[in-house]
Amino acid sequence: MKAFNFHEVKSVKEATKLASNKSTFLAGGMTLIPSMKMRLSSFSDVIDIKEIKELYGIKVKGKSVIIGANTKHADVAASKEVRKAVHSLAGLAEGIGDPQVRNCGTLGGSISNNDPTACYPSACIALDATIHTSSRKVDAENFFTGMFETSLKKGELVTAVEFQIPEKSCYIKFPNPASRYAMVGVYIAKFKKEVRCAVTGAQSVVYRCKEIEKALNNNFSESALDSVSLKSSNLNSDIHASAEYRASLIVSCAQKAVAGSK
Ligand SMILES: Cc1cc2nc3c(=O)[nH]c(=O)nc-3n(C[C@H](O)[C@H](O)[C@H](O)COP(=O)(O)OP(=O)(O)OC[C@H]3O[C@@H](n4cnc5c(N)ncnc54)[C@H](O)[C@@H]3O)c2cc1C
């Protein structure tokens, strides 16, 4: 690990004031620390945001659930409010990694890192989320821009994520047996006006699967997906799964998600 200056801050204002082109924010450190240790990344300044109290907490307000950026996966999984409002969101958090990762990893860290196989980006897209940052509010669909890339500007801090509460929803992941990251993860959310289907793990960035949405908007049932066949030419192929296998996994995960929606 290369040498850096370490700052512990207590407010969003203090964090953004210290930020520069060569700095980074430290949340749970689940991704940042290993990548710095392996010298995949290095920074002049590391700004520890763990002590910023305003970045924690869960609120259900009207038709939305607002979760602070520093909220840990274990806290989302254990939250009765989240489970009651959006059962699938608590379930998603419960299925991330292992207990150590869930007790250190944060919502803000997960979406800012935007790993193409991470679970939370699919929740943001399916639940039509708005990302609150230190300077603006961004629709989730304009936030995740590419592999490990977001529309965050240098020094911009995610402060919270506002998820819309659907009528029914479910997240089904086919996990990598070692890391528990998604080889494919499908999040289905049924709203009064539309069904949204977000897929993670299958392309370089999370995306909405229009073929599945179209079928489910006509008929919200497992059998509506029997005739859906996805092309594999635009899907990831690696040692874990071929593109063809992923295409078939997306449909079967979507069918399980429809069956499990509540
Ligand atoms: C073994 C293992 C298994 C995992 N399995 C899964 C899984 O199954 N599913 C899944 O979805 N994820 C999984 N993860 C990812 C994990 O859930 C963490 O969310 C992720 O690693 C980010 O870690 P962190 O929250 O500690 O953020 P950090 O590592 O501290 O930060 C990550 C990046 O985000 C930036 N950042 C952090 N917070 C903010 C903020 N508020 N605003 C702006 N930028 C910010 C940092 O500067 C850094 O660039 C796994 C991780 C590990 C190590």
Image: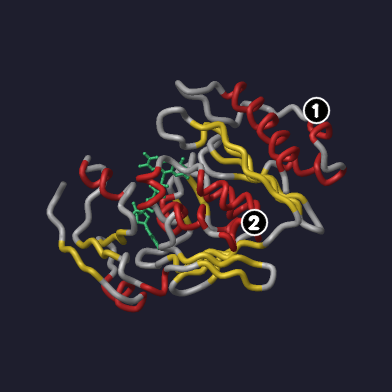
Instruction: Please name the residue that numbered disc 1 is placed on.
Output: 226
Residue projecting furthest to the right = 218
Instruction: Please name the residue that numbered disc 2 is placed on.
Output: 86
- Left or right: 24 with respect to 245? left
Instruction: Give the image quarter of residue 197.
Output: top right
Q: What element carries label 2?
A: loop
- Left or right: 261 with respect to 142? right
Q: 10 Å neighbourhood of mark 1: few (<14), some, or many (≥20)?
A: few
Viewer-proximal residue, 112 or 82?
Answer: 82
Q: What element carries label 1?
A: loop
Instruction: Give the image quarter of residue 48.
Output: bottom left
Amino acid at the residue labelled 2: Val
Residue projecting furthest to the left = 3
- Left or right: 76 with respect to 1? right
The residue depicted at 68 percent of the width and 41 percent of the height is: 209
Amino acid at the residue labelled 1: Asp
